[in-house]
Amino acid sequence: MMSGKDLHAFVINYRAEDVEKLTVRMKNGLGSSKYKPAEYERLQAIVDAKRLESDLIGQKVQKTRCTAKATKESSVLRQHRQVWSRECPRLQKAEEKAEDDIHDFLEMIRPNDRTDTATFSLQESALLLEREREAFRIATVEPVHHLKDDLRFRLGEIQHQSNASGSNWEQVIQQIHFVKSQQDNITAKLHAEYLGLEEEITGLELEKYLTGTSDNLVDIEELPEEVLDSDCPYPELQDSLIQTFQSLAERYHSRIQNLREQLQTTHRFFGWCADEHQRFQFTLSLYTPPDVPNHRTLCMDMLQRLFPQKTKQELTEHERVLDWQRFTQAQLKVVTQQWQRDHEELLARALFTLQEARHAHQEELELHRDRQSQQDICLHLRKKFVWRLRQTPVCASTAFIIPAQRHSGEARWIPP
């Protein structure tokens, strides 16, 4: 950047003759004798060649990008299949176990007599469900297997024949579309029945018995009956034990109540519908094991595939809230276990203390009885001793009087 001094020097050094010379050269053509005319055709050809080369490079880049994207997609799908291949046997075993448990339960039920209609109706319902299930399998699953076998047979024939009839393929395509629409209708009907059954179970409040999770916790403010109804010989000791249990309950009550309120403030499914929330939880459970390679990226990819209408931020926020709820539930479980452990330890010490108090009271009673017996014996001996002391002078005077009388009698008696 030029300063004011340099600009002033430039203006001074510029001359008017240069303007005139430049004007003459512009009129006569710039460098008419010094410069060669431009070859526009050759430059255009060079530009077209460069443009074509650039387009070819761009196509190669785009093709490479598409190939890399397809390879990445194939790799991700292969990893998803690996995760599902690990989960599928577990689900099959769980299904078989549930069916075996139901079958064993129905086998164990025996009617009391012929009037036990409830047991007979339950067995009849089980047989009816089995027949309906078999009929549903024949009506829905068997056509798909037949169509699959038919397509494999047709493909095998085409590999041995050079030409194929177009009309047959049109019939096959129509049959495929018909089976597909039939399966879609059946799936929609099953989904509607599933939602209706879910609403019915929710209305009956049977979900906690089906899932096996219950939020009913032990009342920490309840005092143990072993202490309240104990025959403690010392009332002060019993009152002290009751106060100790009350202080323990007060110490844990605020913590457990706070955690319960935190769980109650959140929505049941965090603003999502029940089906989406359950699918979200199931997908997270699939990719939770740490031995799954790149499980975090795979989990988010599968969530985006399952919920295309949800943004990545919404999915992450839902996962964060779900983790917070799980953490709060884990805290509540830990605090409850701590209270149960402390309560059991305090109850064991209280029972031991009450047992020792009863033993000590029994020893005091025995000692009191011994002392009372000793006092009675001492009193009896004292009375006997006093009686003997009282009887001793009488005996001594009697012993003195009798010999004296005998001597005086002998003196008065004179033989003839």
Image (spheres, rainbow, N blue to C red):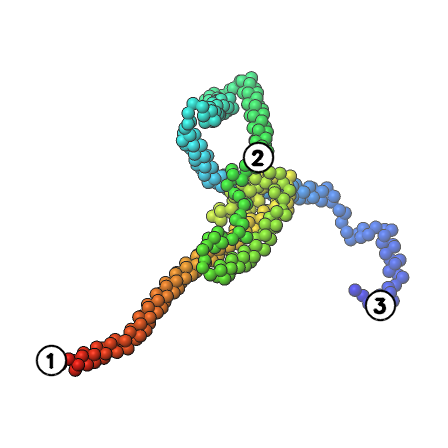
The answer to whether one can see residue 149 in this image is: no
Q: Earlier in the sequence, mark 3 or mark 2?
A: 3
- Left or right side of 289 for 4: right
* Residue drawn 19% across the image and 81% down it: 408
**Is the residue marked by circle 1 packed among few (<14), some (14-19), or many (20+) residues within 10 Å?**
few
Q: Nearer the observer, disc 3 or disc 2?
A: 2
Q: Amino acid at mark 2?
A: Leu
Going 28% across and 76% down the picture, which residue do you hit?
394
Badge number at residue 187: none
What residue did someone put label 1 on? 415
Residue at label 3?
A: 4
Amino acid at pointer 1: Pro
Label 1 – label 2 distance at C-alpha: 134 Å
Circle 3: residue type:
Gly
Q: Nearer the viewer, residue 19 or 315?
A: 315
Mark 2, secondary structure of its residue: helix
Q: In the orientation shown, which residue stands out farthest toward the bottom? A: 411
Mark 3: few, some, or many residues within 10 Å (few <14, many ≥20)? few
Q: Secondary structure at mark 1?
A: loop
Residue 208: x percent and y percent?
Answer: 54, 40
Q: Residue 286, relative to residue 410: is it above or below?
A: above
Q: Secondary structure at mark 3?
A: helix
Q: Earlier in the sequence, mark 1 or mark 3?
A: 3
Q: Give the CA distance from mark 3 to mark 2.
A: 92 Å
Q: Quadrant of the C terminus?
A: bottom left
Disc number placed over residue 204 in the picture, else none = 2
Identify the mark nearer the N-term, 1 or 2.
2
Q: Return the residue found at the far front.
A: 416
Q: Nearer the viewer, residue 372 or 50?
A: 372
